[in-house]
């Protein structure tokens, strides 16, 4: 009998060991496959079982969490949702997350182990911390000015602080309210279908995810390349620039919207946006130097993140001389996001140096303790400092005496460049109206803001430069909002 008891005890111990091994196998080695199984709702229920952290602008949250009392308990809410949608994106129980809601999901959802005072322990027991907050670099006044300026229009605005790369405004129009996608009711799929079927594409972030031909605003880059290469040494010396200008190797003649562009100086050509002068300058500089200068400004950079990804702005380095002429005036294959063109203006304002743009100032725990900070990245030189001085002078002339007079601000120095970019089959589409600019208050030690505005549905009267009429007033409102803020950050 004793022998049978021993055998039974040994068999029970063996079974217990097998159970422990199996439990360890499931919990340690196969846990990820169970977590990722679509039939497992525990992770989803846990994810929405507590309030999500907030995204802050100017110290105030522009997001929130609503208790529904359902299994997926908390739904995302948005304050001024359409105005901040290009920044926040959406956090949907059905369709996932986008933009900051996606790139900072670990902090906002509470899964980032750095939110815990004991991150290794929390990571081991797979616990969820209270959601942390994401503090943005946005200037609320600038964001509002940009949003109101684009009201009823289609286009985008990007504004940055030249010395640091902090993004002060990021607006895309038309926009949408992310809250319509937050829950899991029957209205959510209907809203999703409606937004995706809308021909105006309200969920497209035009400020960072759409590239446009930059038109004459690209002449800032061409002028920088010409000055750096020594192709132009005197802003006021007449150039050898016929009007019209025949593109090299072709019979195509390039003309100007403005009269009197033949052989004018670089100063006058920049002020009145003479295509013929800049097309010939680009050819004389050469494709290698033009491409290198464009790249120094940020073109052809495929991996830019702010922290979500930004579409690549491009300058084609494999072009013939005729194509190079068109590329040098922002046409042919040249494409840029509004954020990229804001970086171009910022480089001029910042003495020729470019700072990579960023949107998140810091992340914090629910208690307010800082988890991480961003800070400015190392600067790269887009042009020589002496060239930046001359370009600042040229851009100021555009606002004082040229096509950008609608951007003038009393009590400030403002530099700008207008642009009207052709597009569509045979350039049949309504031209895009561009304006890039920077501003420095009379009491400021350095420029405080650089802005790029593009309006897709501009009223392009060919007797005028539409960028000065349609886009410049929006840029002025954004710059005024930043300049009138004592701290420059709207906090």
Image (cartoon, rainbow, N blue to C red):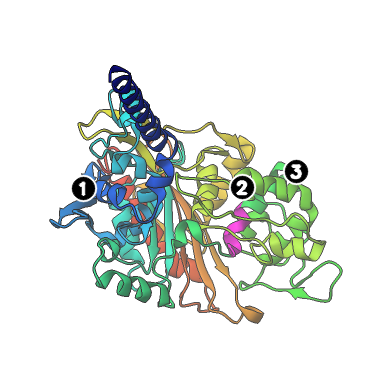
Q: Which mark lies nearer to you, 3 or 2?
A: 2
Which of 238/86 is in front? Answer: 86
Q: Name the residue furthest front.
A: 1
Please indicate, yes or no, whether residue 248 appears anywhere in the rendered image.
Answer: yes
Specify the principal SS of the magenta part. Answer: helix
Helix, strand or loop at label 2? It is loop
Which of 252/292 is in front? Answer: 292
- How far apart, in angstroms, are the residues tagged by discs 1 and 2? 40 Å
Residue found at x 77% / y 75%: 253
* Placement of 27 over or under 33, stated as above or below: above
Residue under pointer 1? 49
Identify the mark nearer the N-term, 3 or 2: 3
Magenta-highlighted residues = 213-220
| In magenta segment, residue 219 | yes
Where residue 356 appears, as percent x and y from the top left, is 51, 40
Residue under pointer 3? 230
Where residue 427 appears, as percent x and y from the top left, is 63, 78
Which of the numbered marks, if any, corresponds to residue 301?
2
Left/right placement of residue 128 relative to residue 197 reads: left
Tell me the quarter of the image containing the N terminus: top left
Left/right placement of residue 483 relative to residue 80 reads: right
Tell me the quarter of the image containing the C terminus: top left
* Placement of 148 over or under 186, stated as above or below: above
Say if mark 3 contacts mark 2, CB within 8 Å: no
């Amino acid at each position: 009998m004793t022998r049978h008891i021993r055998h039974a005890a040994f068999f029970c111990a063996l079974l217990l060991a097998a159970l422990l091994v199996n439990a360890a196998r499931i919990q340690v080695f196969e846990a990820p496959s169970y977590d990722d199984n679509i039939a497992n709702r525990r992770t989803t229920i846990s994810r929405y079982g507590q309030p999500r952290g907030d995204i802050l602008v100017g110290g105030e949250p522009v997001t929130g969490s609503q208790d529904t009392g359902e299994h997926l308990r908390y739904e995302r809410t948005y304050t001024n949702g359409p105005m901040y949608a290009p920044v926040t994106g959406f956090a949907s129980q059905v369709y996932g997350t986008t933009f900051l809601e996606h790139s900072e999901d670990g902090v906002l959802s509470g899964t980032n182990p750095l939110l815990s005072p004991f991150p290794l322990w929390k990571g081991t027991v797979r616990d969820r911390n209270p959601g942390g907050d994401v503090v943005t670099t946005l200037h609320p006044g600038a964001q509002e000015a940009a949003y109101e300026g684009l009201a009823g229009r289609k286009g985008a605005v990007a504004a940055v602080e030249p010395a640091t790369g902090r993004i002060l405004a990021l607006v895309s129009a038309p926009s949408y309210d992310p809250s319509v996608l937050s829950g899991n009711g029957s209205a959510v799929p209907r809203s999703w279908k409606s937004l995706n079927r809308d021909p105006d594409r309200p969920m497209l972030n035009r400020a960072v995810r759409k590239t446009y031909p930059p038109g004459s605003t690209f002449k800032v880059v061409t002028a920088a390349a010409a000055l750096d290469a020594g192709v132009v040494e005197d802003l006021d010396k007449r150039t050898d620039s016929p009007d019209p200008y025949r593109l090299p190797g072709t019979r195509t003649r390039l003309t100007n919207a403005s009269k009197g562009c033949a052989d004018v100086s670089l100063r006058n050509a920049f002020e009145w946006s003479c295509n013929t002068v800049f097309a010939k300058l680009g050819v004389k500089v050469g494709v290698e130097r033009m491409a290198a200068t464009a790249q120094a400004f940020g073109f052809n950079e495929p991996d830019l993140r702010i922290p979500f990804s930004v579409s690549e702005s491009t300058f084609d380095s494999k072009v013939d001389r005729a194509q190079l002429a068109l590329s040098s005036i922002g046409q042919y294959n040249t494409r840029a996001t509004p954020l990229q063109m804001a970086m171009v203006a910022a480089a001029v304002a910042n003495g020729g140096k470019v700072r990579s743009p960023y949107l998140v100032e810091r992340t914090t725990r629910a208690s307010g303790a800082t988890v991480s900070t961003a800070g400015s990245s190392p600067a790269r030189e887009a042009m020589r400092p002496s060239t930046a001085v001359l370009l600042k002078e040229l851009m100021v002339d555009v606002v004082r005496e040229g096509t950008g007079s609608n951007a003038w601000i009393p009590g400030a120095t403002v530099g700008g460049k207008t642009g009207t970019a052709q597009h569509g089959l045979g350039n049949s589409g309504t031209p895009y109206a561009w304006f890039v600019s920077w501003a420095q208050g009379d009491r400021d030690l350095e420029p405080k803001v650089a802005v790029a505005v593009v309006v897709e549905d501009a009223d392009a009267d060919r007797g005028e430069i539409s960028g000065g009429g349609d886009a410049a007033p929006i840029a002025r409102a954004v710059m005024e909002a930043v300049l009138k803020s004592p701290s420059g950050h709207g906090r």
